[in-house]
Amino acid sequence: MRLDAYTHFIPKRFFDMIVASGHKDIGKRVREIPSIHDLDVRMRIVDSFPDYAQILSYPMPPLELMAKPQEIEDYAKIINDGFAEICARHGDRFPGWVAQAPLGAPDAGVRECERALKNGALGVQIYTNVAGKPLDRPEFAPFFEAMNKNRKPIWIHPSRAANFPDYVDEKKSLYEIWWTLGWSYETAAAMSRLVFSRTLDRNPDLKIIVHHFGGIVPMLEGRIGPGWDQLGARTSDEDLGVLRKSLKKRTLAYFKENFYADTAVFGADAATACGLAFYPLEKVVFASDCPFDPEKGPGYIRETLRILDSANLTKEQRNQIYFKNFEAMVGKTFVR
């Protein structure tokens, strides 16, 4: 069995509600991908791959960009209840789902996350920022404390749009650089903030899975390792050396040991090799990022399977990536 740990879908009720509202971010990109909201189309894609099933999660845009704080929790409930219904009816194809965490809610989404987890969610999804705010702001601490207590995993999805300019004297990012390059940086930045804010030290039982092999992280092992071993050497207006010494372990160790990473790198052989070389094998989970390939569904699944099946891995190592690491992360057995 291959359990695809990070795929995206929008339950029908929520999709219809947002389209009817005219929200611009749910328009061009998503409407051109039928399998992201049409369950029949999606099931045909799943059925086209043997011994394969998907874990469902919501894609974009973040709820915090769509709704007022008092509405966000209700939006999340519609999404989460939609996933619970799909997985209850089609558990052979979709054996699990990820709840959408409304971090913009007054209680940082804790109440809805707890409700969704009791309703069967395997974990919860957040974004790398909350309407532009970093995850290490004190207002989000109750969420991380709750997830540390219940020991359910957190899926972290990159979030960045054209309003993040490429250069400080510009008003917007050009040529979709905000996505192609920006999301990979965004993921690495969010991971770094969780490390240096000591969020991970305060919450040692957090389980976090980062998308796309952690973005640029595997390529920057030298900077994260020997480079950040010298944290503070480049800064004169504050003593970052004190912060470095206060961390419980070496910076590089947090990135390798405190995060799970998925294999969703858009069918890139080199990126997969780099990710597998960086992360301990037990921290890698199979994911495709379906359905955002040019074929609108099967492309990234097929290419990710091709890469992993041809990698220099034993059968046991391949099974670890395909389902065993995921089962360990969520604390549930799917394959018998």
Image (cartoon, helix red, strand yellow):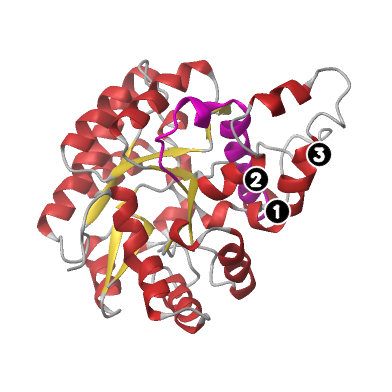
For the residues bearing labels 1 and 2, Cβ distance under 8 angstroms? yes
Q: Which residues are magenta?
A: 180-208
Say what secondary structure mark 3 lies in: loop
Among the 4 quarters of the image, the one containing residue 244:
top right
Q: Amino acid at mark 1?
A: Glu
**Which residue occupies the foreground of this view, 202 or 59?**
202
Compare residues 110 and 38 and report the one nearer the observer: 110
Asked whether residue 130 appears in the rendered view, the answer is: no
Which amino acid lies under the numbered mark 3 shown in the image of this protein? Tyr
The residue carrying pointer 2 sits among few (fewer than 14), some (14 to 19) or many (20 or more) residues within 10 Å by Cα, namely some
Nearer-N-terminus badge (1/2):
1
The N terminus lies in which quarter of the figure?
Answer: bottom left
Please name the residue that numbered disc 1 is placed on: 221
Image mark for residue 167: 3
Which of the image's four quarters has the C terminus?
bottom left
**Image check: 148 left or right of 241?**
left
Main secondary structure of the magenta stretch: helix
**Residue 39 makes an appearance in the image:** yes
Residue name at image x 57 percent, y 42 percent: 254
Measure how far apart labels 1 and 2 are at the Cα level.
Answer: 7 Å
